[in-house]
Image (cartoon, rainbow, N blue to C red):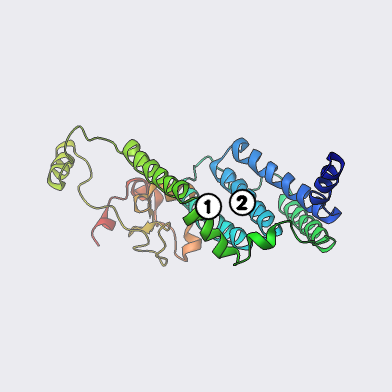
Amino acid sequence: MNSTGTVLLAQELTQTSTGEEVQFWILATVAVVGALGVVGAAKAVYSAVFLAMTMVVLAVLYIAQGALFLGVVQIVVYTGAVMMLFLFVLMLVGIDSSDSLVETLRAQRVLAVAVGVGFGVLLIAGLGNAAMRGFVGFDAADASGNVEELAVLLFLDYVWAFELTGALLITATLGAMVLAHRERLRPRRTQRELSEERFRTGGRVTPLPGPGVYARHNAADVPALLPDGSFAENSVGPLLRRIGRNWGHDDLGVSGPADEGLGGEKNAGDGRGEGETR
């Protein structure tokens, strides 16, 4: 085969339809934007959302190339399990008191919906107009099925690389555990020692009031009510006090303290008084 024939054959094999090119450039642009958002976002939660977006785009590219199983695994395992678990942990324990829960940009939700709908329309239009021709060598490579051929590649052709990757992940996990472990310079103090220290320093020796003891709600962020009607602020943890709702007596359906000047403010500050003897 001469050089001219080789060039013509290469052009034929690498030729793509207009719809496929549109689909690739849209998905590639979104993937690059998501990757840049991962490293450029100011907050870890935003980085996790950008990474999930990039993973979904990669899954769509896999499915478009005929790797259905790989695309589904990309969504179910990486995006649906690993990333959502990571995002859930960040949302649960990673919220700082300085984070604002109020929209800083007006109409950003409407803009997000419009961008999402437009992206979906472009994606559907690109897939609908694509000329789905067979990939070169795809039938031979996928003769026994996508899952079976993938298993052959992992456990026969590249079994050494697969096992080495597993050993690397286990080593990384153990290394993270060792690095995160803090050596104790002194043994853990017992409950008796802690109790003696509280008595010696004049600290609080009784348990803190539980949330919602005298209130009509038993949610963890609802402060308990003391007998005079004031709030026992120590009945709610410090994290919930920062990010929780600012409850009022009207929200609880009860009346306020009878006389704030006779001890309502004091009881609200330290939770002491008759409310401790339940």
Give the residue at x 28% y 50%.
272
Labelled pair 1, 2 in contact (Cβ < 8 Å): yes
Give the residue at x 83% y 61%.
131
Give the residue at x 86% y 53%.
18
The image quadrant where one finds the C terminus is bottom left
Q: What residue occupies the far front of the structure in this picture?
A: 1
- Place of residue 201 in the rendered image (x, y in percent of width and height, measured from the top left): 18, 36
Q: What residue type is labelled 1?
A: Met
Q: Name the residue under label 1.
A: 83
- Report the front residue among 37 and 135: 135
- Place of residue 161 in the rendered image (x, y in percent of width and height, measured from the top left): 47, 46
C-alpha span from label 1 to label 2: 9 Å
Q: Can residue 245 be seen in this view?
A: no
Badge 1: how crowded within 10 Å, few (<14), some, or many (20+)?
some
Q: Along the horizontal axis of the image, is 205 left or right of 13? A: left
- Place of residue 269 in the rendered image (x, y in percent of width and height, measured from the top left): 36, 45
- Report the front residue among 173 and 211: 173
- Place of residue 235 in the rendered image (x, y in percent of width and height, measured from the top left): 35, 53
Q: Along the horizontal axis of the image, is 35 left or right of 85? A: right
Does dot 2 land on a helix, a strand or a loop? helix
Residue 55: assigned label? 2
Q: Is residue 131 visible?
A: yes
Q: What residue occupies the far top of the structure in this picture?
A: 185
Q: What residue type is labelled 2?
A: Met
Q: Along the horizontal axis of the image, is 25 left or right of 45? A: right
In the rendered image of this protein, does residue 167 appear above or below residue 213?
above
Residue 207: assigned label? none
Point out the frontmost of discs 1 and 2: 2
- Report the front residue among 205 and 36: 36
Does dot 1 land on a helix, a strand or a loop? helix
